[in-house]
Image: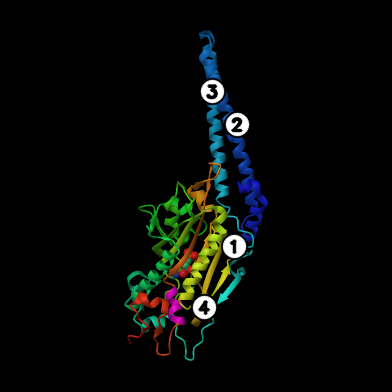
Amino acid sequence: MLLRENPDLVKRSQEARGDSVAAVDEALAADADRRASITSFEALRASQNAFGKTVAQAPPAEKKALVAQAQNLAAEVKAAGVVAAEAEARFTSVMRTIANPIIDGVPAGGEANFATLRTHGEIPTFDFEARDHLEIGELLGAIDMGRGAKVSGARFYFLRGIGARLEIALMNMALDHALAADFIPMITPTLVRPEIMDGTGFLGEHADEIYHLPADDLYLTGTSEVALAGYHSDEILDLTDGPLRYAGWSTCYRREAGSGGKDTRGIIRVHQFNKLEMFTYVLPENAETEHLRLVALQENMLQALGLSYRVIDVAAGDLGSSAARKYDIEAWVPTQNAYRELTSTSNCTTYQARRLDIRYRTETGKTAPVATLNGTLATTRWIVAILETHQQADGSVRVPEALRPYLGGLEVLTPIR
Ligand code: AMP
């Protein structure tokens, strides 16, 4: 166990994340307690078994006294069992407060402390006043926020006409990229049991960002990562032929509880959107290579769409509990004069697999947890960057060449009013 083998590494990770370093010592103490209590429970049980044999073989005259002693011993075993169970529960509960140890090189600090790894593409410029994605979406008859609010409330919308077609085109293009890279396409459940939601690490400090249906005790997923991680829960996987790779298409639901007044215009931050998500089960020693592969696939997709972007190494304090490293790709959104996140890819190392009990068989025949990774291949939010980047003076939008086959060859989206 990493905690016991290298507590300093776990402490450094906690510090870089801005989390409690003392929790590591608490966990070590709880671990020592737990192991000591299990040892004394097992020793008592062994002597109980041995004593049981003595009682069985004893002459009838001595039996009565011995049986009384055996009863005392049984009570002691029972009490030691309770102590051991309590110590185990204490250990589990402290361990749950410790996030996945970060990978060496992840920048320390919070949201603003990311490191930019590279940028790609020119920042687009316009010789007319650029419109924002909502203005363009309304000219095209593609986005209807007003009726979204009427039907469902703030942060809901309708994609209509070319807007709906654009989203389906984008998702199909993403799916083709995933298929070419050997991912198995999946359409996943979007309602999951609490243990699956918890196993993926989503019920920690950010639990209030998730919709819960108490009548059924099911959670609405904010990403198909949850269902795809649960897919192989409680299984021993055969990874001898390479990683298992899935591409999950799902609607994603987010309460956006902490977002307050952020991104209230248009579809950049909404309660419901679609996403094609890559998910990999891989041997732990190959996880970092797989992570780079996922980023490369994301970059291919963004480049095919003619978007300008930067790749960032997200700082420790902004990783969430399950990721040991996370690369985000942010595309340039002209009217915001800023890069905005379009993809995120996380190496969760063995964190989710340990909680969901997903293992592989090592060369010695023992089992060990696998590593899991996930990464975005396209979302509804990509429409924002596409519309703004490829807009023209008359409100029309050039369709990136690679997307045209998915829109029946359409080269330009033209305003309907
Ligand atoms: P995450 O799973 O939080 O890393 O997000 C993955 C991707 O989903 C982001 O890069 C966005 O493209 C998209 N996304 C996340 N939250 C929202 C939201 N509230 N509205 C629209 N798109 C979102």
Residue designated by label 2: 40
* Magenta stretch encompasses residue 249: no
Q: Residue at x 38, y 78 (%)?
A: 404
Q: Nearer the viewer, mark 2 or mark 4?
A: 4
Q: How many residues crowd mark 1 within 10 Å: few (<14), some (14–19), many (20+)?
A: many
Residue at numbered disc 1: 317
Whole-percent x and y of residue 217? 38, 52
Q: CA distance from mark 1 to mark 2?
A: 40 Å
Q: Of the residues under marks 2 and 3, which one precedes in the sequence?
A: 2
For mark 4, what is the residue?
308
Q: Nearer the viewer, residue 223 or 372?
A: 372
Q: Distance between the Cα atoms at labels 2 and 3?
A: 14 Å
Magenta segment boundaries in residue numbering: 382-389
Q: Amino acid at mark 3?
A: Asn
Using the image as rendered, state which of residue 398 and residue 250 is in the foreground: 398
Mark before the other along the chain sequence, 1 or 2? 2
* Vertical position of residue 2 compared to residue 341: above or below: above
Which comes before the other along the chain, label 4 or label 3? Answer: 3
Residue 362: where, in percent of width, then height?
54, 45
**Distance between the alpha carbons at the discs numbered 4 and 3:** 71 Å
Q: How is the protein colored in the picture?
A: rainbow
Q: Earlier in the sequence, mark 4 or mark 1?
A: 4
Q: Main secondary structure of the magenta part?
A: helix
Q: CA distance from mark 2 to mark 4?
A: 62 Å
Task: Please state which amino acid type lies under the numbered disc 1.
Answer: Gly
On the image, the x and y values in percent for residue 21 come to: 65, 54
Which disc number belongs to residue 49? 3
Kind of residue at badge 2: Ser
